[in-house]
Amino acid sequence: MTSISDHSRDIPILTAVRAAANKLAQHPQDHGWRDLYRLIGFGLSSSSPQLRKLFLENANSQRDSSATHLITLLGISLKIVAVDLFDELRTKDKPESCLDSLEAVLAEHGDHIAAILSSRRNSFTGARRFLVPQVVLGAYFANGYPVDFADLGTGLGVLPRQLNAQRLYNTFKTGLRWAGGTPSFQPIPLRSRFGVDQGPLPRIDWVRACYGTSPYYEGLYRELMATFDDPDVRASEVGYSELDLLDTDDLRAFIRRNNINAVNLSYTLYELTPESRTRVIDTLLDVLRPPGVAIVTEPHAELTRPGCTVTVYDQSTASPMTIVTVSDGHFTGRVDPLPDYEQFTTLHPITYEFAR
Ligand SMILES: C[S@@+](CC[C@H](N)C(=O)[O-])C[C@H]1O[C@@H](n2cnc3c(N)ncnc32)[C@H](O)[C@@H]1O
């Protein structure tokens, strides 16, 4: 009898997830997931019938997900179903020694894991990711034009609450050095705010599970929780909606119904296949109320290198403007300009408190 593992080395989904796991395993920063990714990559390169079966049998329900996202979601699923074994699976010893344990977990909990992979997405939510959208939207709408804003792929939904929270901006701005100095706080003329994610909307337990187990992530999680206690964050009015961004008709209807003219997608599109990313952006640019703008923050090299790039899609310019890189995806470190920064700031000046 031929087993599923014998002839699966050239199957595209397995090739893709194996490559993604191996690249994630080489990320220069380790905040608690890297050894697990190494084990998954090793498993997919050797005999691991359960691991292969998981991806092969569920390929259909995962067809819109990027390979990187599938690997991170498998990591989260293992953390949930194998609480007792999770540390063992992440041992720094050679992965060969852990593969049997991984296969045993998958044999026992495969159905539960498959259900998570087909119904959930990685909803890690960062407390500092509003900093750049605050600056970009403040500059873009400095003319006072009313803004109806939606954060698409909002995770726990903190970012739409944080916009215009000046105290919070002042607290976090010191951790992010811009090449030109510190951008002055510029309020956005917000008229309405929405947070959008696929259903079921991520709740605190799910988002907690999406954080790695390390002191570093513990600190970030505490920061996220503390942010919800900020008085401005608590006071802001945000409408939350369940919506699959890949349902183009629903996305159009939502944007039109709410007159949205500004959207933010932060670490959302990398979870989708490249074709789906393009479809979402094209739909948005077609349907946003003019003057419409989309800010897209995407991790470098599909999450396999530190940091991210921020791109502004402006309905009134012919092509997207890739304006800055951020050295750390949790929005600490440095913001450095990219070639389109000048074009953006010529159109929409960013002012600095302390210019360098
Ligand atoms: C990694 S989280 C980022 C959360 C937040 N934007 C941040 O940067 O902190 C990505 C979010 O995008 C959502 N997402 C991904 N694909 C989606 C889709 N097709 N429709 C709706 N939400 C989606 C996920 O559910 C997840 O909550």
Image (spheres, helix red, strand yellow):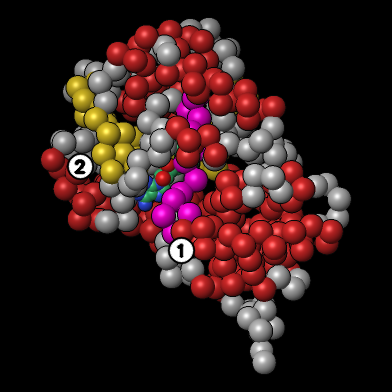
Q: Which kind of residue does numbered mark 2 sit on? A: Ile
Residue at point 40% right, 39% down?
202
Residue 186 falls left or right of residue 262: right
Report which residue position mark 2 lands on: 255
Compare residues 207 and 237 and report the one nearer the observer: 207
Compare residues 101 and 188 and report the one nearer the observer: 101
Prevailing secondary structure class for the magenta stretch in the rendered image: loop
Depth-wise, is mark 2 or mark 1 nearer the camera? 1
Q: Please tell me which of labels 2 and 1 falls first in the chain.
A: 1
Residue at point 69% right, 83% down?
6
Is 75 placed above or below 4 here?
A: above
Image quadrant assignment for residue 232: top left
Q: Which kind of residue does numbered mark 1 sit on? A: Gln
Report which residue position mark 1 lands on: 62
Q: Residues within 10 Å of mark 2 (few under 14, many from 20)?
A: many
Mark 1 secondary-structure assignment: loop
Could you tell me residue 325's position as x and y percent? 55, 34
Q: Is residue 322 something one can see in this rendering?
A: no
Marks 2 and 1, how far apart at CA: 26 Å
| Res. 104 mark | none
How many numbered tags mark residues here?
2
Residue 179 falls left or right of residue 26: left
Q: Please report the bounds of the magenta region as a residue range.
A: 116-129
Ligand 1 sits in quadrant: top left
Q: Is residue 128 magenta?
A: yes
Is 5 placed above or below 15 here?
A: below
Residue at point 69% right, 32% down?
214
